Amino acid sequence: MDLKTKIANNTAVVGVIGLGYVGLPLMRAFNAAGFPVIGFDVDRRKIDALHKGQNYLKHLGGDDYIRQMVASGKFDATVDFGRLGECDAVISCVPTPLGAHLEPDLSYVEQTAIDVAKTLRKGQLVVLESSTYPRTTREVMMPKFEAKGLKCGEDYYLAYSPEREDPGRKDHNTQTIPKLVGGIDPVSGELATALYRKAIKQVIPVSSAEVAEAAKILENTYRAVNIALVNELKVVLQAMGIDVWEVIAAAATKPFGFQAFYPGPGLGGHCIPIDPYYLTWKAREVGHATRFIELAGEVNRSMPRYVVDRTVLALNDRSKAVRGSRILVLGLAYKPDVDDVRESPSFEIIEHLEQLGADVDYHDPHVPATHKMRHHDLQMRSIELTPEALAGYDCVVVATNHAAYDWPMVVKNAKLLVDTRGVTRNLAGDKANVVQA
Ligand SMILES: NC(=O)c1ccc[n+]([C@@H]2O[C@H](COP(=O)([O-])OP(=O)(O)OC[C@H]3O[C@@H](n4cnc5c(N)ncnc54)[C@H](O)[C@@H]3O)[C@@H](O)[C@H]2O)c1
């Protein structure tokens, strides 16, 4: 049976490589659509958890989220990449981080291509979902497959489909976020589109893998640049004594031509602080600079330092040195209501404050303890958040606006509150202890 028929009758075995924030819900979406799925990951703990019916990504739901998949009888997960040959379609969702000098680290994507190439067979479809610069699918993945003497579009098929996952979002999920698909050649594009249409409500084919790759970078650059714009405005308006949050709310009353973006303590997450730099690196190949991306990066990367400076000044106003002060940072995750701490500005804020001699703790309802990351290893545990605990700190810095926080209680008990998220704006009562940052 050919791939087109297997897709049409839901019997194509779908392999998903990299079972993180992107891969796990994707695998489940295909399983829910009736397809047999096999998950692949190098992290044995994830594979073991899945076999036990445990969900390690809490924002997706409880263990039932996994158990339903296991109960379908059409699910398997493994660390054995030799089994990739069992799949009719293989979708790679591995990380694409930055190296120490903001250069793309495509080692995971390359490793995936090597793994897939080992068992690549006629009729297989391979799709890359990881965010990356245009031409990665063609220049990094395809050569590994062609080296086996197989021809793309005839023997096997290759496409790119960017992931647009937004963990924690309530109004959209993997199935409802429209999906772009671009093939290395028309046949690959058509097959990948047909496959995704089985699991995702709206699939938008584009003319090439490169268009799909570049569209994802455009989406993330658009956010990075606009967030930088409001972060810069925040600094200017705060110096003028004007409330940036009220200004944004006022501008957002315009029914067209304006989209509200909000300032914060810096950029976080796996995508927006990272993906645009993939294009910056690639653009040099064609002799161009990506000035908007670099300027936005400069502004956004300066924000944790700005928050620390405002904190130091606020303590100074109260005749306190930052050295020896007890400071509590609220929120370690990079955005509300998730446990994802990748690239979170909270880490930099904590490290800067500690370098200045402060005694720093954190609280995050979703992150009970820190773990070793690429650039940070804080080795801290979340404190218990009580009115008494809050009152024991010289300063409380709001870094993440988790819904679980009781802001009136926080404002009431903190001696000094540095608000980077505008959470205190609409609170009634005395806010003499609040400083915006
Ligand atoms: N998280 C998001 O919301 C999101 C949104 C859009 C795009 N993306 C992009 O999707 C990609 C994956 O992101 P993520 O957030 O799911 O990352 P993640 O870290 O949550 O998951 C990646 C998984 O890949 C596994 N892995 C690493 N190397 C591997 C290998 N060689 N073979 C198999 N598995 C391997 C890791 O163990 C991990 O489980 C990245 O390119 C990211 O930029 C993520």
Image: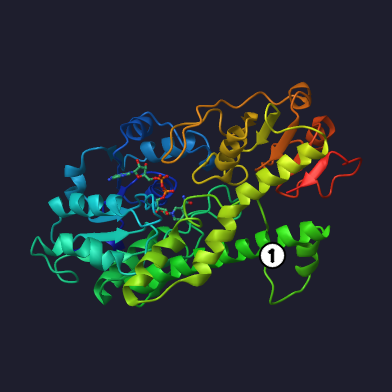
> Is residue 1 visible to the viewer in this orientation of the structure?
no
User: Mark 1 belongs to which amino acid?
Assistant: Ala
Residue 96 locus on image (x, y percent) = 37, 53
Seen from the viewer's position, the closer of residues 80 and 278 is 278
Q: Residue furthest left?
A: 149
Res 296 quadrant in image: bottom right
Query: Which residue position holds label 1?
Result: 260
Q: Nearer the viewer, residue 106 or 189?
A: 106
Q: Residue at x 68, y 26 (%)?
A: 324
Q: Secondary structure at mark 1?
A: loop
Tell me how the rendering is colored. rainbow
Residue 249, position as x, y percentages in the image: 78, 63
Mark 1, Cα crowd under 10 Å, few <14 / some 14-19 / many 20+, is: few
Q: Is residue 360 above or below residue 299?
A: above
**74 or 306: which is nearer to us?**
306
Image quadrant holding the N terminus, namely bottom left
Q: Residue at coordinates 69% horizontally, 77% vertically from top-left?
A: 257
Q: Please indicate whether residue 398 sits to the left or right of residue 144 in the image.
A: right
Residue at 15% across, 71% down: 154
Q: Residue 397: in sight, yes or no?
A: yes
Image-based side of 218 in relation to 427, left or right? left
- The correct choice, above or below, for 103 with respect to 193 in the image is above
Based on the displayed image, in which of its 4 quarters is residue 253 positioned?
Answer: bottom right
| Image coords of residue 291 (percent x, y) | 50, 71
Q: Nearer the viewer, residue 202 or 260?
A: 260
In the image, residue 337 sits, relative to residue 172, either above or below, namely above
